[in-house]
Image: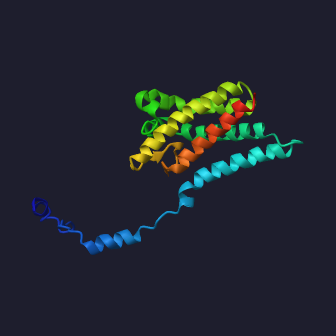
Amino acid sequence: DTIKDSLANMPKYAVDHFTPSVQNLESEKSQVTPVSKFTTYKPLITVFSFVLLVSLAFQIFNENFNPHLFMNHIMAGFFIGLSFFKFLNIKAFADSFSGYDPIAQIFPSYGLGYPFIELALGLLFVSGRFLLAANIVTILILAVTTVGVIKRLKSNSQFQCACLGTAFSLPLSGVTVFENVSMILMAAFGIVSRF
């Protein structure tokens, strides 16, 4: 009423009370188009497809398929590719990452350093150097993150996955767990196959 009185001398402007009806709310809900899982995870699928194609292309030009080298290239591609997206906005990534990674929750600077760790791991895997250390670090950091993701998923809270930084809005889900566990298994294979 106070605002109405203030606008009395300005006929171009008016203020009125609005009470949403159930019918209006229902029509707004029906206009929201659900997003498919493919559309949601399209950026991650695209990154995985490129990494897989490059890794396979390298193997095609070898005389024999080398599973150890193939996995190293997949891991290198993932770490380098995913770190790239995190570098686009490291601060925003660190904030999002601290929402589910147990180490980043205690030490926020870990989230700021994580893209550098991923990049270093990727370069080690592609170069074939210090692979035992790279595999051990991979297992440790991804195991900790996976525990944090599982805890967050059990709490049924909606949270953004920071695996592609904050450039894309991906929900934290079982896909994140699958991605981490796959990398952990490849790293474990890399350790076991050396002996």
Q: Can you see residue 95?
A: yes
Q: Residue at x 71, y 33 (%)?
A: 190
Kindly give the residue lying farthest to the bottom in the view shown. Answer: 23
Q: How many marks?
A: 0
Position of 48 with respect to 55 (left or right) is: left
Residue 186 in the image, given as x and y percentages of width and height: 67, 38
Q: Is residue 128 above or below residue 26?
A: above
Given residues 30 and 19, the one toward you in this image is 30
Query: Which quadrant, please, contains the C terminus?
Result: top right
Identify the residue shown where x is 57% and y is 30%: 140
Residue 23 location (% of width, % of height):
28, 75
180 horizontally vs 102: left or right: right
Q: Residue at x 66, y 25 (%)?
A: 133
Judge whether 187 appears above or below 41 on screen. above
Residue 165 rendering spot, x and y as whole percentages: 52, 42
Instruction: Answer with left or right where residue 20 lies relative to residue 43.
Output: left
Q: Position of residue 54 (x, y in %)?
A: 75, 46
Colour pattern: rainbow
Residue 81 visible in the shown view: no
Which quadrant of the view contains residue 188?
Answer: top right
Q: Quadrant of the N terminus?
A: bottom left
Residue nearest the observer in this picture, 23 or 84? 23
The picture quadrant where one finds residue 6 is bottom left
Q: Residue at x 54, y 45 (%)?
A: 177
